Image (tube, rainbow, N blue to C red):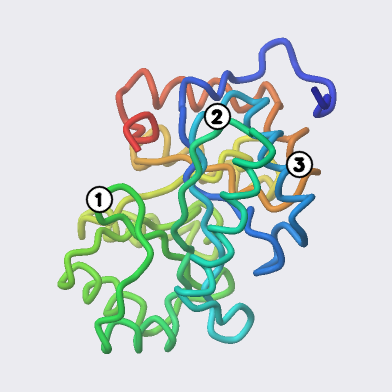
Amino acid sequence: MKLWGKKDSDAFDYGLLKTDMHSHLLPGIDDGSPDLATSVEMINGLIHLGFKKLITTPHVMQDMYPNKRDDILRRYEILKKHLETERIDVELGVAAEYFLDDNLKKLLADKEPLLTFGDNLVLVEFSMASEQYNFKELLFEMQMQSYQPVIAHPERYIYQEKNKDFFEELKSAGYLFQLNIMSLAGVYGKTVNELARYFIKHEYYDIAGTDLHNTHHFSHLQNSSIAHGLKEMLDAGKLMNPQL
């Protein structure tokens, strides 16, 4: 078995989560895995951490990654069959990480089916630089079409750090929050880490995911500083991962 760096003795047991619902494992489709061999390496790494089920979520973003549903599903089937051929024992699912842009607006207007996980969960993200003028309208339209939006890594929207009402409003509207696990290891900076801890304290998170993009992330995922936050959420019964 490949050693994924030195593992802290107090590293979190991801078998307790069972499911990773945010990753970029499909080869050559976004800023995640560049090829099939890397996809397999990343998947083996997640299995080594203890995950039993992986839901990969490639970007769907008009300007950078204009991926179509059919192409995502085609690449997913190729990867899934390759894992079967290699006898890699893991349950693999597919959804997408939709950017709240004009492309998503058109998909919703045309009633094009979105890629979901769970029953009707849809992972979404928006600008990390500044607040978009119409993102709330898109989230509401998703609800009207019986989708349950899941806000990806809300702790990374640090331009709203001083405006906690922004996040409270999203929670009050019924949107789920997804933690990027590596935020607890300080990978994205001090402010992101502090926001993540704030959300844990106030029980805002519903789901956790690795947001794995490359093999370099494994050393961070084994950081012992992650364990306390995840255990606190699991003990409080706040994380949906084991049921996904």
Image: 1 above or below 240: above
Is 200 situated left or right of 139 in this image?
Answer: right
Foreground: 18 or 192? 18
Determine whether label 2 and label 1 are within 8 Å by CB.
no
Circle 1 crowding by C-alpha within 10 Å: few under 14, some 14–19, many from 20:
few
| Residue projecting furthest to the front | 85
- Does dot 2 land on a helix, a strand or a loop? loop
Q: Which SS class for mark 1? A: loop
- Going by the numbered disc 3, the residue's amino acid type is Glu
Sequence order check, earlier mark of 2 and 1? 2
N-terminal-most mark, 3 or 2: 3
Q: Which mark is residue 51?
A: 2
Q: Residue furthest top?
A: 9
Name which residue type carries label 2: Phe
Q: Is residue 123 left or right of residue 221?
A: left
Amino acid residing under circle 1: Asp
Residue that carries the numbered disc 1 in the rendered image: 119
Please determine whether, in this image, residue 180 is positioned above or below residue 35. above
Residue at 54% x, 20% y: name it: 228
Question: Percent x, y for residue 71?
Answer: 53, 74
